[in-house]
């Protein structure tokens, strides 16, 4: 087991072979769920792709027991997700992809902040004109892709659905702070068989290919690099967990993004 406590800000270890995690006894034991291949196959380029039964694990509502009052007071939830390294057909392992609803009484959706704790992740962020539109009517407004390395953080801007991809031959572990006030939704992701772009391996190289199920076509990908935004607790040298416990007000953007639009976008430098 590899000790990630320094990077995470609390006692955490990962089994680099199995993707299993171990949390210290001062941690809340999270509720966990898994995404299995059968469920994921609905959004894969190749629905018949072979693979292990479980593709990734989601651990919800964790964090140190002693900090539980802080999550309540600020309507925040801390989760972990661990990913296998696996090819599904010629496509790299990825999450199903989901959207967040608008905050009640506003036209702004909840954002989310992720931190890579081990490995490296590609985040695909996708904005739709209508999240529930059929493949015939689905209009993709924007697609942004960013690579995030261990220790870095990335904010999913309001209105952007997201998929996470692991392209490395090691597992990937990430954490997130998100509002505890909503549930994600999938819209027509399954009907469209995933997001607008698939990442596949061709001749040993990763290659983006457009998802042909978006019948109106898809926009070109805008590639981005992540940047530190200290005002939002986004720095590379401090664990995201510790940043929030030390200064929870910096994470107010998770529940009130409209106030912090400029800072949220400062995290992404479009290339
Ligand atoms: Fe999310």
Image (spheres, rainbow, N blue to C red):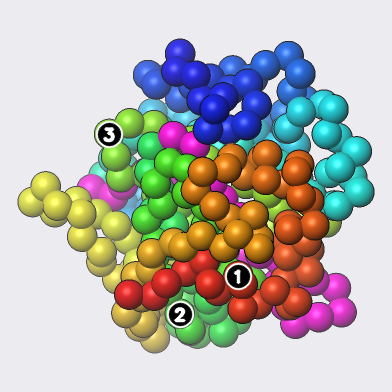
Q: Residues within 10 Å of mark 3 (few under 14, many from 20)?
A: few
Check the image and report above or below for 106 versus 15.
below
Instruction: Please give the name of the residue rendered at 23% of the width and 48% of the height, measured from the top-left corner.
Output: 90
Q: Residues within 10 Å of mark 2 (few under 14, many from 20)?
A: some
Indicate which disc, 3 or 2, sits on the residue closer to the N terminus: 2
Principal SS element in the magenta part? Answer: loop
Horizontal and vertical percent position of residue 255: 78, 63
Q: For the residues carrying marks 1 and 3, which lies nearer the camera in this image?
A: 1
Residues drawn in magenta: 90-118
Kindly identify which residue carries mark 3: 169
Indicate which disc, 1 or 2, sits on the residue closer to the N terminus: 2
Kindly identify which residue carries mark 2: 142
Is residue 255 shown in magenta?
Answer: no
- Give the quadrant of the C terminus: bottom left
**Number of the label disc, if any, that sits on residue 264:** 1
Is residue 95 shown in magenta?
Answer: yes
Horizontal and vertical percent position of residue 155: 57, 61
Labelled pair 1, 2 in contact (Cβ < 8 Å)? no
Instruction: Please give the name of the residue rendered at 73% of the width and 32% of the height, measured from the top-left corner.
Output: 63
Residue 186 appearing in the image: no
- Residue 90 is left or right of residue 17, and the answer is left
Instruction: Please give the name of the residue rendered at 80% of the width and 57% of the height, measured from the top-left corner.
Output: 249
Q: Nearer the viewer, residue 199 or 271?
A: 271
SS type, badge 2:
strand
Label 1 CB sits under 8 Å from any ligand 1 atom: no
- Give the quadrant of the N terminus: top left
């Amino acid at each position: 087991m590899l000790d990630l406590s320094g990077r995470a800000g609390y006692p955490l270890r990962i089994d680099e072979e199995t993707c299993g995690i171990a949390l210290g006894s001062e941690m809340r034991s999270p509720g966990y769920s898994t995404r299995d291949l059968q469920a994921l196959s609905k959004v894969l380029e190749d629905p018949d792709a072979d693979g292990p039964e479980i593709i990734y694990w989601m651990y919800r509502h964790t964090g140190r027991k002693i900090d539980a009052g802080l999550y309540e007071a600020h309507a925040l939830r801390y989760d972990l997700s661990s990913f296998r390294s696996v090819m599904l057909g010629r496509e790299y392992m990825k999450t199903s992809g989901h959207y967040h609803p608008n905050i009640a009484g506003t036209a702004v959706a909840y954002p989310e902040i992720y931190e890579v704790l081990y490995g490296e992740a590609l985040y695909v962020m996708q904005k739709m004109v209508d999240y529930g539109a059929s493949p015939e009517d689905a209009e993709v407004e924007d697609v942004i892709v960013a690579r995030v390395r261990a220790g870095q953080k990335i904010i999913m801007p309001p209105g952007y659905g997201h998929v996470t991809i692991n392209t490395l031959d090691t597992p990937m572990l990430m954490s997130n702070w998100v509002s505890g006030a909503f549930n994600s939704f999938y819209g027509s992701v399954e009907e469209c068989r995933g997001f607008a772009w698939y990442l596949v391996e061709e001749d040993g190289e990763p290659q983006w290919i457009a998802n042909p199920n978006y019948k109106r076509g898809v926009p070109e990908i805008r590639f981005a690099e992540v940047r530190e935004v200290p005002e939002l607790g986004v720095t590379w040298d401090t664990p995201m967990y510790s940043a929030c416990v030390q200064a929870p007000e910096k994470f107010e953007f998770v529940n009130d993004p409209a106030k912090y639009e400029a800072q949220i976008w400062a995290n992404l430098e479009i290339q």
